[in-house]
Each structure stands twice: as C-alpha cells, then as structure tokens.
Image (cartoon, rainbow, N blue to C red):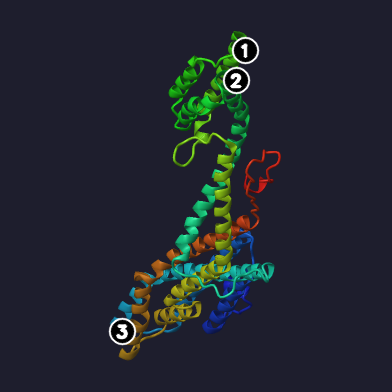
Amino acid sequence: MAPHPFLASLGFTEDADLDAVERRFLEVVKDQVQKVSFNYEEEDVRQEEAALRDLHGRFFQYTVQWILQEGRAHTGTPVPEATKLRKQARAVLEDLQRHMTEFSCCYMHINRFMTLLRDEIRQEETRLAGHVATGVKWTSDAGPVIARYKQQKKTALETCQRMQQARAVLEDLEPDFQKIHQGIIRMYGGDKVEALQRPLTAALRMREFKRARGAVATILETPRKFGVDQKTAEQVSDDVRQAASRLIDQCEKHQDLLASDEGRLYLKPIETDQSYNAQVRELRKIKAFLGKYYMPYMQFKLDMLMHLKDKLLVNGSVESLMTLYKRMITGMARPMNDIKTLRLYEGEVLDRVQYLLGGQFQEVPVILARAEETVKEFRSGAEEFRDIENLEVAEIESGLSNQDAPATSGIM
C-alpha cells in the first residue's frame, strides 16, 4: 500500500511510527519559522505562512486517518466511560487543530518580528556609534512626552513654513508702510507721525479693517503743515491713499496667514522672524530629546515583543501543544480500560484542552495584533527620528531680507 501523501512528503513509509512522524513534523515547523525570521519581504512571509498552514492541515489529515487505522487495530468492546471521553475528544478535535495552527503562525510572526527588530537595532547602533547617549533608560513618562513632542514638532514645522510665507507678504507691504510714513512727514511734519500712524497700525494689528480705513481718512483730513503747496499735497495724499488701500486690502486678504497665536496680525518681517526663531529653538529641543531616547525607545519596543511572546507561551510551546494533541488522539484510538488511565486522560488531556479552547487560545489573535502594532510603532518611531535627525534649521538674523536669510529648505 502506498504511504499517506503526508508521510511520503516527509520520507516515511506507511508503517511509520507516530512519534517519529511527530518529531519530523516539528522539525519542519521549526525550519519554516527560522527560514522566515530574516525575511523583510511581506509577500514572501505571506507565502511562508500559507505553507505553514498547509503543513499543519496535511499533518492533521494524516492523524485523523491514523486514529481510524489504529482504532481498527485494537478491537474489543470499550468501557462505557471511555466511549464518553472519546466522544468529547472528537467534539473538540477540529477546534484544537485550528487553534494549534493559529498558534504556530502567531509564533512564527512574533519570532520574525523580534529577529528583525534586533537586527535593525544593531544596524542603528553601528550607524550611530559614538553618538548614542549611554545610561539612558526608558521610563513610563517618556512615552507621553515623545507623543507630545511629535505633535509639537508638526506644529513647529507648520508654523515655520507659515512664518516664511508671512514674511514674504510683509516684505511686499514694506514700501506701502514707508510711503505712508514719509507722506505723513511731508504733509504734516515728523512730530505728527506717531499720532497719525499709530491708529492705523493698531487697527490693522487687531484686524479691525473698517477702523483702519477710518484712520486713513483721518490722516488725509488733517490740516497740512505750513509751506506745503496744493499740488504737492494732492500728489502726496494720492500716494498715501493708494498705499493705505493696498496695505489694508492685503492685510485683510492674508489675515489668517499673518495672525499670531493671540490672533493679532504681524505687520513687520522682524516680528515673523522672532516667531520663526522661537520655533527653531523648539525644534532643536525636540531633536535633542528624541535623539536621547531613540535607542531606549527601540529597545522598549523589542522588550514589548518579548513580553508578548511570553504571554503567548503561557498557552504552552509548539512542542507541548503537540504532546497534548498526541495524547488526545492516542486516547481516541487505543484502549483505555483501567480507571487510572481514564482519570488521567480526562484530567490531564481533555480538561486541559477545554481550558485552552475556553479562553487561553482566544488571546492568540489579540497577541498577534498587538505585536503587529508594536512593530508599526517601532518603524514609525525610527522614521520619525531619522526625519528629525536630518532636519537642519537656522535662526533668521533680524533685519535680513529673504535673499540674505539662511536656507530653510530643511523645514519646508
């Protein structure tokens, strides 16, 4: 008779001993788990998982056939209690097989995750040799701080970009401010500048554009100083009117861009520069903190995977589950005629199986999902660090134009 296809695939003949088949099966499982450990290709991993599931399925098909063959080899009338226990075993056989398959796949993934994270940590330690803070331990409050700093980094980068855009708008408005300033001096004298220009500036800063237009009207209605002829007065008034109109219209158009955290408008490039530089200093602080806790964070995530693996193994190892399965199918196929054997089978096998199926196995998909999330967080943290590691920002010196300002492409 030709051997069962599963036996043939492992190199066994039809009369192979179950213990030998079980040992070889476990060896193949371990080989597949090890094979996938260093594989970064997700498609390859999916194929390996499918192969592992197929391997379990073919093994379980073989064991079902073994139960039938072994049962026929042991004839006789079983004791009533043995029949009852075997019925209970048959009722949970498929569930146990299914959960054992899920357990092996979960173990494969967690083992791979741990191997890959260890490898990535070693690579980072090599890359950052001499630049890694020593003696830094991950603490429970570091996580919330990092999460807060990530949000602050995002906000700081957005603010820097907005301040650069706002600076460009304000530089375009500088000639209008100067034209109004010089017009007031020519029309009314230098001693009137503060009194006439301040209401306009205050109204613009508070986004009260109607009041700003009223301030312009007040400027133009103020009696001109002695010695200013009519023609000059009309020309200067037109220049001030046009400059003020452009100024107010542009401030109103770009009010959201020019707004400070308090809601007031920036009106001078030096003001946006101060806000920009404050964000640069904040980014440097964040960069220093993330650099300090980067490696401890990565190790913390690896430790979390180790904890999840320990939690998985509370259910037992692949080997111990296989021993339990083998004891259960052996009891289903071979005689159990004495009371001691029956009690052991009930207490150490069926009760254990029922316990695992009733709760412990339900944790396996939860553990796998948490492991996948942990790896995602690990990769996200590594990417976050590399992004900010490459971030080079410089403060803008007061009074510089955009052409003279430091290059800021790194934060755009």
Task: Tell me, yes or no, if residue 58 can be seen here.
Answer: no
- Residue 395 on image: x %, y %: 63, 49
The residues tagged by marks 1 and 3 sit, at their Cα atoms, a distance apart of 124 Å
What SS does tag 2 mark?
Answer: helix
Q: Which residue is mark 2?
A: 186
Residue under the image location 59 percent in, 59 percent down? 385
Q: Which of label 1 and label 3 is nearer to you?
A: 1
What SS does tag 3 mark?
Answer: loop
Q: Is residue 388 left or right of residue 363?
A: right
Residue under the image location 55 percent in, 58 percent down? 285
- Tell me if mark 1 has few (under 14), some (14-19) or many (20+) residues whose alpha carbon lies within 10 angstroms of its own: few
- Residue 49 on image: x %, y %: 56, 64
Task: Tell me, yes or no, if residue 239 can be seen here.
Answer: yes
In the displayed structure, 208 sits above or below 349; it is above
> Do the residues bearing badges 1 and 3 touch, measured as CB atoms within 8 Å?
no
Q: Which residue is mark 3?
A: 79
- Tell me if mark 2 has few (under 14), some (14-19) or many (20+) residues whose alpha carbon lies within 10 angstroms of its own: some
Q: Which of disc 3 and disc 1 is earlier in sequence?
A: 3
> Do the residues bearing badges 2 and 1 touch, measured as CB atoms within 8 Å?
yes
Q: Which of disc 1 and disc 2 is earlier in sequence?
A: 2
Badge number at residue 232 = 1
Farthest residue in the top direction? Answer: 230
The residues tagged by marks 3 and 2 sit, at their Cα atoms, a distance apart of 120 Å
Kind of residue at badge 3? Val
Kind of residue at badge 2? Arg
- Residue 98 on image: x %, y %: 45, 67
What SS does tag 1 mark?
Answer: helix
